[in-house]
């Protein structure tokens, strides 16, 4: 479920955020999309067409009057799977809302039947103006998706109000979602992903935890969101930046994670239990900092709750439940036992003692274990592993 080979028109209007559009064009191209850039005359004053041609390896369209591209607006309007306008200035939004077609980009927007994703970028007062707000309501009413704007520094200085165009990666995530979701079974489904470690306090400053970075769970949340799912990510204190798009619920302890799942599970269609909850805790953590002392310190540890077992009765009927098993050495028998004992649809078995697999790395080698048998995957980037797991999940829905 990728955007490779999909056709995207990237419309760029004349705002200072045009420089971000270069990154956006590059990222969409790297993901395999065929990107046709359409520049307004004002945008071409900020970034020359040659820049976008170099980034996309495709010709850039700038005018209705190019003799070699007669009726270019009709051809471009009919071909794309998605039209993205970033940045969309106040002037561009006004012309689009009025249905004007006085340049190539607005003519294309009037002629296309493709979904449109627009990322406004302008001065904060211009964004707040009733005219701009009315234009956005009109465009939303036509089915356009409006992303942002964000709050942050503007060209003219600091601002604490919306106006700044959202970052390119956020636009890419939304574009992937719009391109992939109509084709997938996860579209509109409620998906809960757990990720990262949990931390059990010993005292006010020390904890029991593990080396989970959260990468695998974050990859699953990112890819499920791209497929159109309504994703909630329940995450412990991970060591990587959070994904864009999913709703994030931050937790600290294993008990916190269990409480969050108890609230979410009755409405959840898919649970992906990729977190690595701590298995042990102390019964009563010290309130302050335990002072350093000479000699051995003995701490009595007690098992934490088994979240999957404890919440089994809260599962929605026909929900797909995926567990993870991190093992050292041969763990296939333990994965099969986990599948049976915890009433799971799938167990993802991965090795903690193999180079390039497990915690704190960008790749993983996993075996998918189900009642249908096993499928051993090669060493892959975790985003690709996430897609393979989600392919399996979609087949079960």
Image: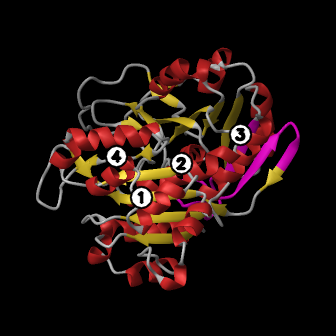
Would you say the residues marked 3 and 2 are in contact, meaning their CB atoms lie under 8 Å apart? no
Q: CA distance from mark 3 to mark 1?
A: 28 Å
Q: Which residues are magenta?
A: 346-374
Q: CA distance from mark 3 to mark 2?
A: 16 Å
Q: Give the label, 3 or 1, closer to the camera.
A: 1
Measured from the top left, where is residue 369 in percent x and y? 79, 43
Which of the labelled discs sits on residue 222, or is there none? 2
Residue shown at the point (25%, 38%) measured from the top left: 292
Q: Give the label, 4 or 3, closer to the camera.
A: 4
**Dot 1 alpha-carbon crowd within 10 angstroms: few under 14, some 14 to 19, many 20 or more:** many
Q: Which residue is mark 3?
A: 185
Q: CA distance from mark 4 to mark 1?
A: 12 Å
Residue shown at the point (39%, 47%) measured from the top left: 147
Q: If the image is split into quadrants, where does the N terminus sit?
A: bottom right
**Of residues 313 and 63, the one drawn nearer to the viewer in this rendering:** 63
* SS at circle 2: helix
């Amino acid at each position: 479920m990728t955007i490779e080979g999909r056709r995207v028109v990237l419309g760029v209007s004349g705002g200072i955020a045009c420089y971000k559009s270069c990154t956006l064009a590059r990222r969409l191209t790297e993901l395999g999309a065929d990107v046709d850039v359409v520049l307004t005359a004002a945008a071409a004053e900020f970034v020359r067409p040659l820049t976008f041609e170099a980034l996309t390896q495709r010709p850039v369209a700038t005018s209705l009057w190019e003799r070699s591209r007669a009726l270019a607006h009709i051809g471009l309007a009919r071909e794309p799977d998605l039209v993205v306008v970033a940045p969309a200035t106040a002037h561009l939004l006004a012309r689009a809302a009025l249905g004007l077609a006085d340049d190539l980009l607005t003519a294309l927007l009037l002629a296309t039947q493709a979904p449109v994703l627009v990322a406004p970028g302008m001065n904060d007062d211009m964004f707040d103006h009733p005219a701009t707000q009315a234009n956005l309501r009109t465009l939303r009413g036509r089915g356009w998706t409006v992303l942002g704007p964000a709050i942050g520094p503007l060209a003219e200085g600091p601002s604490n109000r919306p106006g700044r165009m959202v970052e390119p990666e956020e636009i890419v995530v939304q574009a992937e979602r719009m391109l992939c979701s109509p084709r997938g079974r996860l579209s509109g489904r409620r998906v809960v992903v757990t990720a990262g470690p949990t931390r059990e306090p010993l005292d006010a400053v020390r904890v029991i935890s593990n080396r989970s970075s959260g990468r695998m769970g974050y990859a699953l949340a990112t890819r499920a969101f791209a497929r159109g799912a309504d994703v909630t990510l329940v995450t412990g204190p991970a060591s990587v930046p959070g994904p864009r798009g999913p709703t994030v619920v931050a937790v600290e302890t294993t008990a916190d994670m269990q409480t969050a799942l108890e609230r979410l599970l009755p409405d959840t269609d898919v649970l992906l239990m990729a977190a690595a909850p701590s298995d042990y805790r102390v019964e009563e953590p010290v309130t302050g900092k335990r002072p350093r002392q000479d000699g051995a310190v003995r701490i009595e540890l007690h098992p934490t709750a088994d979240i999957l077992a404890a919440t089994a009765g809260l599962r929605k009927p026909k929900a797909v439940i995926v567990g993870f098993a991190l093992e050292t050495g041969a763990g296939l028998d333990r994965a099969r036992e986990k599948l049976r004992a915890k009433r799971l649809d799938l167990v993802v078995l991965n090795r903690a003692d193999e180079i390039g697999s497990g915690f704190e790395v960008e790749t993983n080698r996993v075996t998918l274990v189900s009642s249908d048998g096993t499928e051993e995957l090669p060493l892959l980037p975790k985003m690709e592993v996430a897609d393979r797991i989600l392919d399996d999940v979609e087949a079960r829905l």
